Image (tube, rainbow, N blue to C red):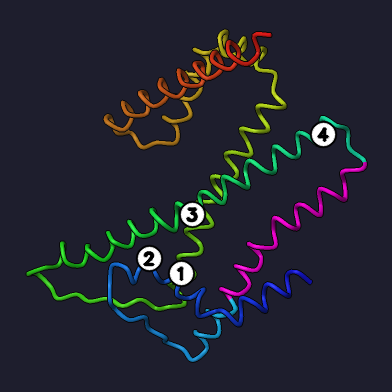
Amino acid sequence: MSLLLCVSISFFDVNALLLLETYPYLKFSNKEFLIVHTTDLLNVVWTLSFTNAFLIVFPFYLYQLFLFFKSGWYVYQIRFIRVSSVVPVLVYVISLVICYTCIVPMFLDFLSQWEVRYFKNVLNVSFSLHIFSYINWILAIKYCICFYMYTVVLFFVKVYYLVNFNKLYKLMKLYKKQALFASLLMFFVLSPPDVFLQLFLIFCSFLLVEILHFVFCYIVVNFLKY
């Protein structure tokens, strides 16, 4: 019922949603959007309505799912689920706001200026955006970045609660050279035989292993000393 209600509200207020999605591009350019097929506008309406409805209903769905299973969990399980649900969702929302206010406008500004910088005095090139492709691209970019941040934060939250950092620190201290060798071997097998690229991969491998070792040392000393 909540999903149908959100779809209905989004459908009747689709003009505001369309303005919200196209504003990052209209802020840098005054060009028009193209409608190639007669059903493009209808596809845009349904895409915006359902994506925003699912985005709004998803936290409510997680909350109802949490209440359904809560009666059969222990106290530490409830605490773990709360932290592993609230923190990644907050990061997801913050990433969505950052994408809308910073990342997408900067990228669109770069693309709009690219036409002038690289084709001036050489070739007269003009482009216009297909509105349905633009909406799909904007939604894909925002949700992919937000989902990536959500997955990374969720992974670190679960690692923090489920992994014994004392044992992990000891393993890292004993097998740091072996881990470095394994990472270098994997990078050399997957990368092309370029000298500068291999030197860069060696530097990245050393940096990654040392950062992981420093993080484990910091967690053990500051959070697990008692």
Real-space Cα distance between discs 2 and 4? 42 Å
Up-down relation of residue 204 to residue 72 (above or below): above
Instruction: Say few, some or many: other residues with alpha carbon within 10 Å of mark 2 (under 14 / 14 to 19 / 20 or more).
Output: many
Location of the N terminus by quadrant is bottom right
Furthest-bottom residue in this view: 38
Please name the amino acid that badge 1 sits on: Glu
**In terms of depth relative to the viewer, which is nearer, 3 or 116?**
3
Residue identified by numbered label 1: 21
In the picture, measured across the screen, residue 171 lies left or right of residue 99, that is: right
Q: Tell me whether the residue at label 2 lies in contact with that at label 1, contact meaning CB atoms closer than 8 angstroms.
A: yes
The residue stretch that appears in magenta = 47-71
Please name the amino acid that badge 4 sits on: Gln
Real-space Cα distance between discs 3 and 1? 12 Å
Does label 2 or label 4 sit earlier along the sequence?
2
Real-space Cα distance between discs 3 and 2? 12 Å
In percent of the image, x 27 and y 59: which residue is there? 110
Up-down relation of residue 171 to residue 46 (above or below): above
Residue identified by numbered label 4: 77
Residue identified by numbered label 3: 97
Real-space Cα distance between discs 4 and 3? 30 Å
Pinpoint residue 90: horizontal percent, then vertical percent: 60, 46
In the picture, measured across the screen, residue 199 lies left or right of residue 154, that is: left
Pinpoint residue 155: horizontal percent, then vertical percent: 63, 36
Does label 4 or label 3 sit earlier along the sequence?
4
